[in-house]
Image (cartoon, coloured by chain):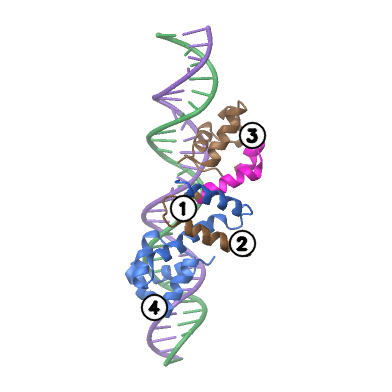
Chain colours: A blue, B brown, C purple, D green
Amino acid sequence: MATQLGDKIRELRTKQNLLLRQVASKLDADTSIISKMERGERPIKKEQIAILADILKADKEELHTLWLADQVMDVIKDEPLADEALKSVSKKIKKGK
Amino acid sequence: MATQLGDKIRELRTKQNLLLRQVASKLDADTSIISKMERGERPIKKEQIAILADILKADKEELHTLWLADQVMDVIKDEPLADEALKSVSKKIKKGK
DNA sequence: TTATATTTGCCAATATTTGTCAAGACAATA
DNA sequence: TATTGTCTTGACAAATATTGGCAAATATAA
């Protein structure tokens, strides 16, 4: 249920002593939404990543990579054939497209 | 838009001279749906993979792997950071979970 | 306790997905 | 040409899923 990006966001936020409310206002969302995002209960929108990186002074690419990894995880979790599928995808994207 | 599984299904079906209608009846779906599945225009349900493997005398695991790879592809296509994200996911699933 | 911060459950609005159907395209055959 | 069979396309409403936000519940701290 937990996500890599959610965990990272929470870590960054608490280390900087920011309240949910402060992040929420910049993201134009209810605190409950942010709370759920951090705990992986609600998805984080792709467009919100850059804003979060700004607020939390984090690297956009790093957060975006975590977000992507979460998306992939969501698809392959509990899939016995995940490994094989991932290999095939990696091969495929390496050759142009 | 095209999918690996869709392409494979069509290849198997045509090589065995089966009509969309015949596959459709076994899958309990309209022919138009099967047509779209084969061309990647409609998603193929996970539970339909085993049935398709039966009809087309194909290996269930092989089809399922193609299906999974399609799901992953859908997530990472057009993502510059795909490679990095995939690596991180592979690492993560290799260690237990 | 009181005050503040976070979490949880629920709802209705919105968005997405779904199956179904009819019409269209296309090729082969008469 | 007209007919037949197969496949494709687009549109539609019904079913499903997702969404944001509220307010109550729960934690945390002083």
Residue position marked by numbered label 2 in the rendering: B94
Instruction: Give the CA distance from mark 4 to mark 1.
Output: 32 Å
Instruction: Give the CA distance from mark 1 to mark 2.
Output: 20 Å
Q: Is residue D24 above or below residue C18?
A: below
Q: Could you classify mark 1 by the number of other residues whose Cα lies within 10 Å: few (under 14), some (14-19), or many (20 or more)?
A: many
Q: Position of residue D11 (x, y in %)?
A: 37, 35
Q: Could you classify mark 2 by the number of other residues whose Cα lies within 10 Å: few (under 14), some (14-19), or many (20 or more)?
A: few
Kind of residue indicated by mark 4: Leu
Left or right for A85, reference A46: right
Residues marked 4 and 1 touching at CB (< 8 Å): no
Q: What label does residue A19 carry, if any?
A: 4
Q: Are marks 4 and 1 on the same chain?
A: no
Instruction: Give the CA distance from mark 4 to mark 3.
Output: 57 Å
| Residue furthest to the front | A95
Left or right for A97, reference A23: right
In front: mark 1 or mark 2?
Answer: 2
In front: mark 4 or mark 3?
Answer: 3
Q: Which residues are magenta?
A: B49-72
